[in-house]
Structure formats: C-alpha cells, structure tokens
Image (cartoon, helix red, strand yellow):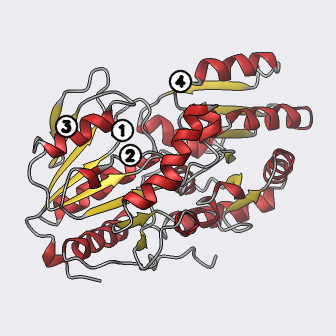
Amino acid sequence: MHDLAELSGKHVVFLSWRDTHNPEGGGAERYLEKMAQGLVERSCTVTVFCAAYASAPPEEVVDGVRYVRRGSKLSVYAEGMRALRRGLLGAPDVVVDVQNGLPFFSRLVTRRPVVVLVHHVHREQWPVVYPGAPGRIGWWIEHRLAPWLYRRCQYVAVSRATRGELRDLGVRGPRIAVVHNGTDPYVPVNPGKSPDPLVAVVGRLVPHKQVEHAVDAVLALQPELPGLRLAVVGSGWWEAKLREYVEERGAGGLVDFHGHVDEETKHELYERAWVLALPSLKEGWGLVIGEAGMHSTPAVAYRTAGGTRESIADGRSGLLVDSPDELVAALRRVLTDAELRDQLSVGALAMSKEFTWQHAQQSFALVLGAAIAGVFTDTQDPEEPPEI
C-alpha cells in the first residue's frame, strides 16, 4: 500500500447524502465522520458535502472538517455535482463518492481520482423503500450504471460481505479495499442490568430495519417471561407506522419508544439491556453491535443482513439467525439461559475492543494515498473477528 506522505496537505472532498446530525443519519454517517477526522489528523484539508436539513447551517467547520449543506434528500445529488463542477468545494486532490444506493455521479464532473465508499448493496431495500418503478430504476442505477461509470475507480467496502456483493455487481480487478468500522470506547455509566428482561433495538426507524420483527418476538415471548420489555431507541419517518403496528398487535404495554436520545442515555440503555436485537434486512456492518458490546450486551441479528457475519462471532459474541421464528428462538435462549448470556456477554465485550477507529482511519488514509498516486488497492483489513 502507498506511503501516507502522499496525503499530507491534500484536499479530500466527501460527497454524502447525510451527515451525522441529520435526523436520518446513522452508522454510515458515523463512519464518514470518523474517516474525515482521521484525515484531518493526517494534515489533510477535508470538505464534506451533504444534504441540508432543519436547524443545520449551510456551512460550518466541526473538528477541522468543513461541512457544506445543500439540497434535499433527492436533490442533494444534483447539487453535489454542481458544487463539485463549479469549484464551490475547492480544488480536491481526491473525491470520496459515498454510494448509499445512488452514487453522486462525480466521475462525470471531475478528472480527479474518485474513491467509491459503499456500506452495502441495496438489492433488497429498493422494493421495500421505493416500490414499483422508482425502486426498479434505483436498482438499475446501482447494479448496472454505477459499476460501469466507476469502472476505473477505487472502491472501499466496510465488510468482506459488501466486497462480495460489489463483485457480484461486476466490480472487477484488484480495487476493492475492505476497511471495517471501529467502535467508540465508552466509560460505562454503571446503571446495571435491568432487573426484568429487556431487549433493545437501536437505530433509524425505517422499513428495512424491520423493528416489527422485534415487536413480534417480544409479544411471542412475553407469556413465558413476565416483565419482558422492548426498548426502541431512535427516530425516523417510519415511526408513526411502527407505533400503529405496535397498537394493532396489542403490544403497547411491552414497547417503550425512547426516540432520538443523547449519547449518555443511549449507552445507559445499552447497559441495561439483556440483549440487542438487530432484525435489519441489510447492514454493511452494524455499528450498534459494537456499541452494545462495549457494555457486555450481546446481539441477535439476521445472518442474511451481510455485515453482521463479521461484526458478530456467532455463538461467541452473539447469535445469527435466518428467519423471524429463529429470531424468537434465539432471543428466548439468551433471555432464559443465564450461563449462555454470560458467555455471550464476555464475547461481545471482547469483540467490541477488536475493531478500532484508529486502525480504520489508518487503513482508509492509506487507500486514499494510493488512489492519489494512481495505485489500486485490494487489501483485506487485517483486523479479523477475534478467537474468543
């Protein structure tokens, strides 16, 4: 991999749908923020272009990173192309095009090296979020047009699962580097575990997170686990529908909606929970898994989500399942078997410490340095799931 000297003094521009403070921001935006901060620490000038939203200034500098906000959820792509073409973002040495389903088509408006950052492929999400023709068009752009447009560009995937998906789309050659997520160290607030069984779901409330599966699981388990509750942490445009679902299923007395909370409250809930449920349809990595693990809280997630196969060591730091019925069975095991829960808790804590942001930042910086030098990188992040 190329020397980091190539990066010193360079200008890096990120094109991203969202930033971390956007109401719809999540793990992908946290990753972007961490990579941007790592580049600033390595003497780079960093600009992040993203969509505008209520209360956010059009421009600001946070931790040395310049944020420029224009456009809406959909128009941000055209605004990003325009800003890059007109030099409104400065003169970048490399552009990081964050492909969250749709790319920014940056390859059409710049001659600078472009690195495509992908958290996961959205094959399963398009028909869920955009049924009918819009979803079919979106999927065609993602799996046909984008691989062709960026056929001479470096890619960064956050997991081996995502790298495999990109290769299935036709991204060929030695140019997909894997740079895993890290986990923020957090000093436990020590409220202790809840005296009654508590399942937590943390993340954006959108259809493909499938929080309904967790609601159904808790409803199925409640007769044999008196006092069982589900804590739903996060907000999103699907919240009203989810609340309706909870009432329709008669689960109102079992589910607590905490909304968007501050970091201290979020970590307190992680620490009180007996288990984290992640019934998401697709995850590039699953940042919440590591966050919960910092509090010795194991996770149960769908194996088919992709990145969960790397952020969870199945049977050691959590459990992977393949269906809603298996989700119920796995949650039952964790909630009723104290010995298993203790074993998974130890593994979850150990796993959370294996993946650091410092390592991810170094790996990402090396990939960008190589891209500036005109060298493709296809390395595997050396941090593998630990043997617990």
How many marks are shown on the rendered structure?
4
3D distance between C-alphas at marks 1 and 4: 15 Å
Identify residue type, mark 3.
Answer: Val
Instruction: Estimate how packed mark 4 is, as few (under 14), some (14 to 19) or many (20 or more) residues with alpha carbons within 10 Å.
Output: few
Give the spatial CA distance, label 1 vs label 2: 7 Å
Q: Amino acid at mark 2?
A: Glu
**Residue 134 image-quadrant placement:** top right
Which residue appears at 65% of the width and 46% of the height?
Answer: 124
Which quarter of the rendered picture does the C terminus lie within? bottom right
Q: Is residue 46 left or right of residue 91?
A: right
- The residue under label 4 is 237
The answer to which quarter of the image holds residue 67 is: top left
Q: Where residue 71 sits in the image (x, y, percent)? A: 28, 28
Along the polypeptide, which appears first: circle 3 or circle 1? Answer: 1
| Crowd around label 3: few <14 · some 14–19 · many ≥20 (10 Å) | many
Element assignment for label 2: helix
Q: Is residue 212 left or right of residue 17?
A: right
Q: Residue 160, image x and y in percent?
A: 54, 70
Please state which of the two labelled residues, at mark 3 or mark 2, is closer to the viewer: 3
Q: In the rendering, which numbered label is found on residue 68?
A: 3
- Which label belongs to residue 18? 1
Assess whether mark 2 and mark 1 are in contact (beta carbons under 8 angstroms).
Answer: yes
Q: What amino acid is labelled 1 in the image?
A: Arg
Of the residues under marks 1 and 2, which one precedes in the sequence?
1
On the question of residue 66 being in view, the answer is no
Q: Earlier in the sequence, mark 3 or mark 4?
A: 3
Per the image, the residue denoted by label 2 is: 29
201 or 324: nearer the eye?
324
Q: Residues within 10 Å of mark 1 (few under 14, many from 20)?
A: many
